[in-house]
Image (cartoon, rainbow, N blue to C red):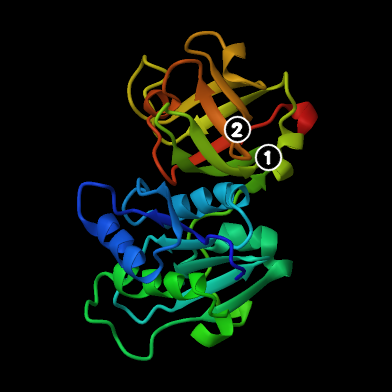
Amino acid sequence: MDQAVPVIVLLTDFGLGDPYVGQMKGVLANSAPRARVVDLSHGVEPYRVAQAAFFLRASAEYFPPGSIFVCVVDPGVGSERKMVLAQCGQSFFLAPDNGLLSLLLSTTKEDSRLFDVSPAVAPASATFHGRDLFTPLAARLAAGEKPEELGHKLDPAALVRGNWAEPRTEGGSIIASVLHADRFGNLVLNLSAASWSPRLPVGGQVRVQSGAGRSMGFGKPGPSRHAARVVTHYAELAPNELGILVGSQGYMELALNQASAAKSLGLGLEAEVTLELPAGSR
């Protein structure tokens, strides 16, 4: 890296109630004191690799070239899973080999190099690789070490794929799943706007079917089916009207105007959602 101040970005499921994030920052304060440390999020739901993959994919482009991302959502910590370093363009991404990099690499694979940076010797702690392994590697990158000095090249085909469902079409329907429910209750689906918004033209309408829900505040819990209007922004929707739109993170969202679609539909992370398209747009 050049002499610019290195940017190190942290993404974890650690939350802020425990000392884990602070300890990682302490390691960086000692070993990379010039670095600017940015918290992307520590609010990933525990063990939810797909949600972390979405956060990373949606956010990486907003950081300067040369940024170093430390991504630790690691249900397999201490096991034989690999530790991976991806160089995408000028930026670096450290993560466990559990699919966390899948969404990012799906858009950058032609400009990416992968390295296995698993340690030859186990660290003192078998349960906190974020502090003891990933963070020191980030500091070494910030000091100017090259990926080749940290590990050996890795065949992309050897990388673990995300174990979550990919979107698909069945007849006249799109089968999607929930990547994220934000604090407003908007449901981010695993439908990238670039690929799927042409199937969902503004002004149209779809039927949303899910396996569980409160029927928009009335009726009994159970399978639910609701009309959703395709709009460009939330204020186009009437109160308690369900809509679908291209969200700010580049994915399709289910939303209510000033209410929680997540609560009304009873949907959480990785829940399956079926969008039934009108006959003319199938």
- Vertical relation: 151 (above or below) 86: below
Residue at figure coordinates x 72%, y 45% from the top left: 195
Residue 94 in sight: yes
Q: Quadrant of the C terminus?
A: top right
**To which residue does mark 1 refer?**
193
Instruction: Tell me how far mark 2 sits from mark 1, CA to CA.
Output: 8 Å
Q: Quadrant of the N terminus?
A: bottom right
- Vertical relation: 231 (above or below) 28: above
Task: Sort mark 2 into few (<14), some (14-19) or many (20+) by Cα contacts within 10 Å.
Answer: many
Q: Secondary structure at mark 2?
A: loop
| Type of amino acid at the residue the image marks with label 1 | Ala
- Vertical relation: 277 (above or below) 56: above
Residue at figure coordinates x 35%, y 75% from the top left: 133
Residue extending farthest top: 238
Figure disc tally:
2
**To which residue does mark 2 refer?**
247
